Amino acid sequence: MANPNIPTPHITAKEGDFARTVLMPGDPLRSQFIAKTYLTDPVLVNNTRGVQGYTGTYRGKRVSVMASGMGMPSIGIYSYELYNYYGVENIIRVGTAGGLCDNVKVRDIVMGMSAYTNSNFGRQFGFDGQLAPCCSFELLEKAVAAARKMGIEPNVGALYSSDTFYDESGAGGKLKKLGVLAIEMESAALYLNAARAGKNALAICTISDHVFTGESLPAQERQTSFTQMMEIALEIA
Ligand code: HPA
């Protein structure tokens, strides 16, 4: 029988259109870039709201890529529908983050073992204490190994998923004291949706700017720096 939840309110793909593993950049154009650069015979499976989703093969493996948009409400919707309605098992976020720690530099790759957050996303689960959104150990272990094989030593630790990009709270300084590596806006919701659905998630981020040093990646270097994280994600897909 056809799945009554498909198409979903936000994804018009057909049942079976997505592979078990979906790479998830924030930007739809980066989704298109990954599909066109790395996938053999990519097929556009979703374009609702311009959120491009493609499925193709990478070194013989069937892989999908679809954008999340920015922020936790957006990635919360897409990851929920992929995990719960499209049978997706693994979502690997490939995005940018702002460095917080002194030893995290622009161009570095950070893998989010956990994600602190100021978001209320987790309140829906009705748990009275603090949640600790964390990644899939299996995906993390594979990603670290794949990075090292490529000669890259990733930074692995806590991310901070913020509801605000422009922020007056001064949270960055407090998080830095707690050893949080980098700030972005999506991973906590992705990790919680994966946990609730019994699925796997990992965020692999490239540091595009640094909150305290003000350093940022020159525009012409953005693409080349980002390809490393994409290749790590494709390797473990
Ligand atoms: N804040 C939030 N998200 C980000 C940042 C930042 O400074 N840099 C890249 N993604």
Image (cartoon, rainbow, N blue to C red):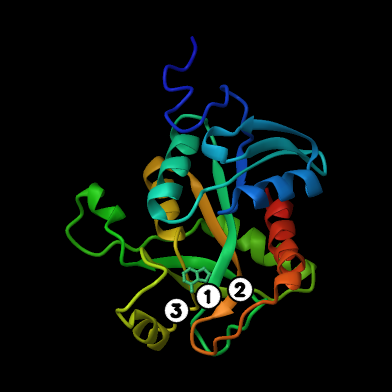
Tell me: residue 52, above or below residue 231.
above
Using the image, determine if residue 199 lies above or below residue 232: above
In the image, what residue type sits under mark 1? Gly
The local secondary structure at tag 1 comes to strand
Q: Secondary structure at mark 3?
A: loop
Residue type marked 2: Ser
Determine whether the beta carbon of the residue marked 1 sits less than 8 angstroms from the nearest atom of ligand 1: yes
Question: Mark 1 touching mark 2, by CB under 8 A?
Answer: yes
For image coordinates 57% across by 26% down, the residue present is 13
Residue linked to disc 3 = 180
Q: Is residue 81 left or right of residue 57?
A: left
Determine whether label 3 and label 1 are within 8 Å by CB: no
Dot 3 beta carbon under 8 Å from ligand 1: no
Q: Secondary structure at mark 2?
A: strand
Q: Position of residue 225 (x, y in %)?
A: 73, 69
C-alpha distance separating marks 1 and 2: 6 Å
Q: Nearer the viewer, mark 3 or mark 2?
A: 2
Query: Residue 37's spot in the image, x, y percent?
Result: 80, 49
Asked if disc 2 is less than 8 Å from ligand 1, the answer is: yes
Q: Residue at x 74, y 64 (%)?
A: 223
Residue tagged by mark 2?
208
* Left or right: where 178 falls relative to 140: left
Residue highlighted by disc 1:
98
Q: In the rendered view, would you say 161 is above or below 36? A: below
Marks 3 and 1 sit apart, C-alpha to C-alpha, by 11 Å
Tell me: 25 left or right of 38: left
